[in-house]
Image (spheres, rainbow, N blue to C red):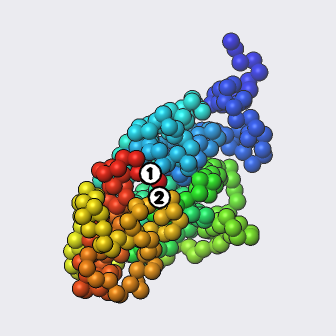
Amino acid sequence: MENISNYNDGQATLTGEEYARYGRQMIMPEIGLPGQLALKNSSVLIIGVGGLGCPAAQYITAAGIGTIGLLDGDVVDKNNLHRQVLHSTSKEGMSKAESAKQYLQDLNPNANILTYVEYASPQNLFEIISAYDIVLDCTDNQFTRYLISDVCVWHGKPLISASALQFEGQLCVYNYRNGPCYRCMFPNPTPVVTSCSKSGILGPVVGTMGTMQALETIKLALHMKGINKEPFVPFILLFHTFRFPQWKHIRIRSRQQSCAACGPHKMLTRSFIESSPSEYATLCDAVPKTEKNLNPIKRITPRELANLIRESPSMTFLDVREPVQYGICNLPSFKNVPLSEVYSMNDLSGKVCVICRSGNTSQSAVRTLQELNPGAEIFDVISGLQGWSKDVDPQFPLY
């Protein structure tokens, strides 16, 4: 039928269905038809489809961003579901990228959803990022954060990065206009970086930060297309559940002349990042100096632990998790001594066995106990309680 009402005003770019779908945001003067077209013609890459990436992808897709890339090599796990709201129980074991695509395609069939079922690496990220206007860092490890930022700098792409842990979160827009890159703000990797799996996370907190990433994405897409004309000021946004006010907005410094990634004398070229993985890794993921030349520790399997519990009940068994985790589940033979209290244990003798949830914290505890108790024979349990549940007692609860 002839379009006698000429509702597109000569711009055959939105369908009638899209007018109905986006009408409630188009009637705002800050967006209008030009803004909606700007969103439709924008492309966004989301790296990490977890606690941050799920709400970010949901609202970006619903708002009408035209092309959305989802990069994640992980699969859906039951312990993700309290915070990764695009996935479901029926999708356990499925690629997170493909799981999210199914949800998003149903939410908005107009969106062009592309998936990359792989982890971000120096070998794939340059090519993938080149195809997008805006990049969202929704990952949770230090190496990948540096890598994403460095590649965005090389391509001149703006980066919206967020993080969340326990009850707090933060967000920053990097590498846009006069703003800094991630390496400007954090030139040296920190040796101790915790994670959700170790310290915990409240679902609404990470959901809030992912939603704020979506909001900043929409603002940035409109700004890049000339719709949002407000001057860009570099900032960092901080959130804490139990503080008042909960939000703090801090203006931050601009790009740093000394930055190895974006400064005038930058050293991090594409060829270096792609061809020198070991050297590059040292610039992204610090190793504590005290761990470089440590003696090896003695480690036993969960099955060997089961034998020790039966055959040597008088042996010292230590669980170095925090009390709240010990209260969730524990092995009766083990006494709870949190890692923070291990540093005062200098009177151990005989055989000592140390366990934690996954076998990481216990290794740190064993190294400390070895230094404090040179006469004791101290063992670490490989894979910790997770290994116990897998290899010894399948009914032992995992969390």
Mark 2 touches mark 1? (CB < 8 Å)? yes
For label 2, the crowd category at 10 Å Cα-Cα, with few meaning under 14, some 14 to 19 and many 20 or more, is some
Q: Position of residue 1 (x, y in %)?
A: 68, 12
Q: Is residue 326 above or below residue 54?
A: below
Q: Is residue 2 above or below residue 6?
A: above
Q: CA distance from mark 2 to mark 1?
A: 7 Å
Which residue is at a point 39% across and 67% down the rendered structure image? 334
Residue lying at 75% horizontally and 18% vertically, measured from the top left = 4
Q: Which mark is residue 397?
A: 1
Q: Residue at x 58, y 75 (%)?
A: 253
The residue pinned by badge 2 equals 329
Front residue of 177 and 88? 88
Mark 2 belongs to which amino acid?
Cys
> Which of the pair 166/52 is nearer the observer?
166
Q: Nearer the viewer, residue 341 or 291?
A: 341
Q: Is residue 193 visible?
A: no
Q: Residue, x 45% and y 74% (percent of image)? A: 338
- Identity of the amino acid at label 1? Pro
